Amino acid sequence: MDFIFIEELRVSARVGIYPRERVAPQPVELNLTFGVPDAAAERDAIDDTIDYAKVIERIRIELAERHFNLIETMGEFVVAMLFEEFNAPWVKLRIAKIGVMKGVRRVGVFIQRGRDGRDVFDAD
């Protein structure tokens, strides 16, 4: 299986349970890797793969319009979108709030899952 990766995608999103997090959007960083069909490289056609520009656009739109209490829920939403809208067979996502606490660069979650719903763990 071949993969596409998107690193350090920064978006403004409303996520959190604390009053300060509910008032205004905050920066969130996403790192994604997702499987693409082998045919993409074989035929050199965009229709045979997942268009990463469309993935980025959808993530920006959806996360700007919604509020999530938990970063875990936000992450699951992005993974489900990749499965349902883009037909990704496998997704690895790291999603983090940036600078949410003094002395902490990022706080977030890591999700890695195959389309069949099984959790797949790879410690990289």
Image (spheres, grey):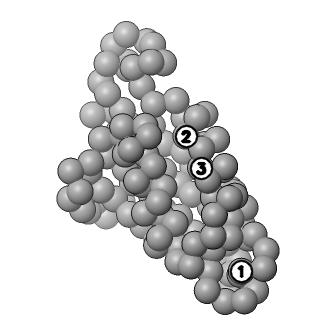
- Contact, mark 3 vs mark 2 (Cβ under 8 Å): yes
Depth check, mark 3 against mark 1: the one in front is 1
User: Tag 3: residue type?
Assistant: Ile
Vertical placement of 109 versus 12: above or below? below
**Extreme-top residue of the structure:** 43
Q: At which x and y percent is residue 121?
A: 26, 62
Q: Residue at coordinates 33% horizontally, 13% vertically from top-left?
A: 42
Crowd tier of the residue under label 1, counting other residues whose Cα lies within 10 Å: few below 14, some 14–19, many 20 or above: some
Depth check, mark 2 against mark 1: the one in front is 1
Q: How many marks?
A: 3
Q: Residue at coordinates 37% horizontally, 50% vertically from top-left?
A: 91
Instruction: State the mark number for residue 59.
Output: 3
Q: Is residue 8 left or right of residue 102?
A: left
Tell me the residue that label 1 is attached to.
22
**For the residue labelled by badge 3, is the local secondary structure a helix, a strand or a loop?**
helix
* Mark 2 and mark 1: Cα distance apart in space: 26 Å
Crowd tier of the residue under label 3, counting other residues whose Cα lies within 10 Å: few below 14, some 14–19, many 20 or above: some
- The quadrant of the picture occupied by the N terminus is top left
Instruction: State the mark number for residue 99.
Output: none
**For the residue labelled by badge 1, is the local secondary structure a helix, a strand or a loop?**
helix
